[in-house]
Amino acid sequence: MKKWTILLAGVPFLFAFDGAGRFVDFATHPIVVMILLSVVLIAFILELFTPGFGIPGAAGALALLIFTAGHVMSGDAGILTVLLIGIGVVFILAEIVLPGGIVGFIGFALFSAGVLIAGASLLWMAISLLIAFVMAAAALIIMIKVLGKEMKFFKKFILSDSTDTEHGYVSNVTRTDLIGKMGKTKTPLRPSGTIVIHGERIDAVAEGVFIAADKDVAVVKTEGVRVVVREIES
């Protein structure tokens, strides 16, 4: 009776061991490795076009978790692999906020190094990673060039308001209302100086080379803030 009790107590352990073994075999299979890495990178690209954290991000995180856990459980990957992949992902995400590209490059380098040393075959891991990068690049091209999508993630960091005249923004006020009006020079215009029109002091430029102070002038044209005046002969 005691013998059967021991055997029955070991059944759950055997099932758990068998399930873990099947998970490791699945997660470390060469074809599955290539698919998981492709899903991770493609999901990252698609997440850039998705507002907030969506399905692509969840799929990529799950694929990365399966890849990392499978290789750790198989004994091929250690703490160094986990640190390289984890820090690489953090750096890649940081590049979304920090400009320059250096942080993102370091992140991809760390992530790639972690992936390369995770598997038993360095050559196959390199091939799988290369295929994943090609697939991600293709996804990026399709999203932008074919589907015409915009990276919604970056909209929160980019000023999208238009500063044009239709929205009330003007870089310089053009004083077209002054054309034809007459005034008097407050200072000599050599060729620029100050004139007074109806009590308003205005910076102006002489149409010629020089106009003396206290001379009658008329505004002949305006170019932005530049007011051109001509002396009125007495």
Image (spheres, helix red, strand yellow):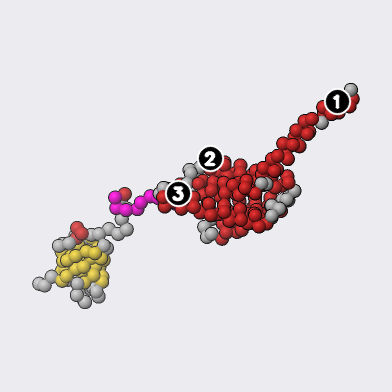
The amino acid marked with disc number 1 is: Thr
Label annotation for residue 55: 2
Residue topped by disc 3: 143
Residue topped by disc 1: 5
Q: Is residue 149 above or below residue 194?
A: above
Q: Is 9 on the left-hand or right-hand side of 31?
A: right
- Name the residue nearer the viewer: 98 or 116: 116
CA gap, disc 2 to disc 1?
Answer: 47 Å
- The chief SS type of the magenta part is loop
Residue at 52% x, 40% y is 54
Q: Position of residue 131 (x, y in %)?
A: 57, 54
- Residue range in magenta is 158-166
Tell me the SS state at disc 1. helix
Residue at 57% x, 42% y is 59
- Name the residue nearer the viewer: 5 or 195: 5
Q: Position of residue 35 (x, y in %)?
A: 59, 47
